[in-house]
Image (cartoon, grey):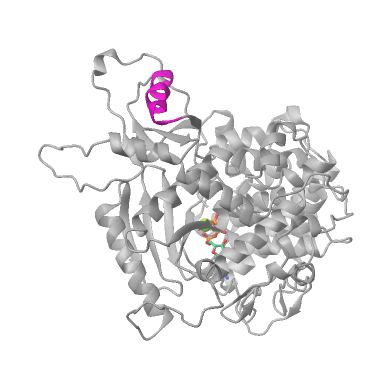
Amino acid sequence: HRPICRLLSCPGTVAADLKREEQPSGNVGTGSEDSVLQKRFSEVQKERREEAQRTVLISCPNKISEKKFLKYLSQHGPINNHFFYESFGLHAVVEFRQKGSVASLQDAACTPSLGTEAAVPFRSRFFSVKLKNPSTSEKSSVQRSSQSPPSSKKLFELLCYAESIDDQLNTLLKASQVTEENAKLRQLTCSLIEDIAAAYFPYCTVRPFGSSVNSFGKLGCDLDMFLDLDETERLNAQKTSENFRMEFQVKNVPSERIATQKILSVIGECLDHFGPGCVGVQKILNARCPLVRFSHQASGFQCDLTTNNRIALKSSELLYIYGALDSRVRALVFSIRCWARAHSLTSSIPGAWITNFSLTMMVIFFLQRRSPPILPTLDSLKTLAAAEDKCVIEGHNCTFTSDLNRIKPSGNTETLELLLKEFFEYFGNFAFNKNSINIRQGREQNKPDSSPLHIQNPFETSLNVSKNVNQSQMQKFVDLARESAWILQQEDKDRPSPSSNQPWGLAALLLPSVSNSRSLAKKKGKKPASERIKNLLDSIKSNNTENSINTSGK
Ligand code: GTP
Ligand code: MG
């Protein structure tokens, strides 16, 4: 399984698509060299973007004949691929082979007349297909691909039936990661928003970043978008030998931040007034990083649009590289995130809790500390950088190699089971009171301030990515890590047999915390923890636990 280990780590690479079916469960990065070249982050994104520009989104009647629908659409040109999914009704994503087919379809479409209401005649790549004679519609319905993570109950069942803890971690990853189709839908949504922003800024690009593209995305995670107005690529193409340079006359504002706010304000209005399927538009312009938040109903994504946020795009690339280096990285990150969510250590509401981004940094740091290390430090990725990788953003050096094939695989062969246990041991005993986590150097540093959790921002090194975390959340994390290490140790001694129907391994770690429920029980006069766990298990058996373990959302 040597070559597959690294390839499978990054959804979206062609090789990963080809090999997806072949993934042996419980595989371990062996450190042996890959024979197949891996794609750079920028190459993957470029391909996806180009693919999205040839793609349309179509709202369909519930009963539709797939064959007739495709035949009808192929009047405009050959179709590369398509899929259906459900989000406030049935939708189809259709990718044409040529971009011209989209224009042809737009020419053939009309703006609806709505009776009592009036339509804003905005011609996008989001359509509705109507049946002229609904009575002749087909009986059979099309197959819908799922865009949401498995329910807690389903996940719990999958985990309980796995063969080993390694198998459990890989199962969780496989069941909840962003799928190929979901990744396409994310890129298409960005592309549709780009069409709207292009009304003001024809040279703009709307790029996805964060967990949609860093390979740590779970089905259902938000869609972070970056409105890129940078013209450097265009400027690089200009002739430098001439004596003249033309500049646009522009309006000046006092700061970059104000320019960002003005741009986002206008785009926010535009999405609100003209964006088909964009609802609940909120302009959050006074945040540290101003953004427009909205819901894209047709894709089902909660979107955060920012601009002037190039460093975040670079950190997505860095995480992508770490995720692609060894198949254990993503499996461990997904499980730790799921564990944190199950115990309400993370939340979809901003607050004093740890974020998924911080948790990912902690896992990366932990893997850099193994012996031999599983992941290289950021400084060593910097030394591997080629001339074209040089990157300085607002004075911060963000240089690291973009070529995965330059990075020597790790010789570490530890199992996921061991790593999970050791993760909880390591952070259950970490000197958070005096040390800072630093993935640039791959070792702890003295904390520069008294924040309860200090994780150095890898690029803006004077910043702490977990500045928001308070002491009580930190303590809760440490208590839960210790308890989880203890549960796994006990299991080593006395592992429940799979036939006993008892949750074990990772599944046992997702149950409500014993110490937490004990203190809650004391406070609120609730039943003892053992009884509550027994009740929970009973309810799982009786198919009634959809929401008992909250692993949905972020
Ligand atoms: P999800 O929880 O699955 O959405 O993970 P995410 O990685 O997408 O996190 P989120 O949506 O909160 O943020 C999007 C991206 O912004 C992250 O991937 C980071 O690149 C960046 N980011 C988020 N929080 C911080 C932070 O505190 N500091 C820095 N420097 N970047 C951050
Ligand atoms: Mg996100």
Along the line of sight, which residue is nearer the eye, 97 or 512?
97
Q: Is the magenta stretch mostly helix, strand or loop?
A: helix
The percent position of residue 93, horizontal first and vertical second, equals 44, 36
Residue 103 position in % (x across, y down) = 36, 41
255 shown above or below 438: below
Q: In this view, does 409 lie above or below 112?
A: below
Q: Can residue 348 be seen in this view?
A: no
Q: Give the range drawn in magenta.
A: 66-77
Q: Which residue sits at x=46%, y=80%?
A: 245
Query: In which image quadrant can residue 86 be found?
Result: top left
**476 to the left or right of 490:** left
**Residue in front for this viewpoint, 105 or 212:** 105
Residue at the left extreme, as displayed: 116
Q: Is residue 542 left or right of residue 413?
A: left
Whether the magenta-drawn stretch holds residue 440 is answered as no
Q: In this view, does 29 lie to the left or right of 252?
A: right
Q: Total marks drawn? A: 0
Point out residue 62 in the picture as x, y percentages from the top left corner.
34, 25
Does residue 417 appear in the picture of this structure?
A: yes
Q: Is 72 colored magenta in this rendering?
A: yes
Quadrant containing the N terminus is: top right
Report the residue at 44% width, 22% height from top: 142
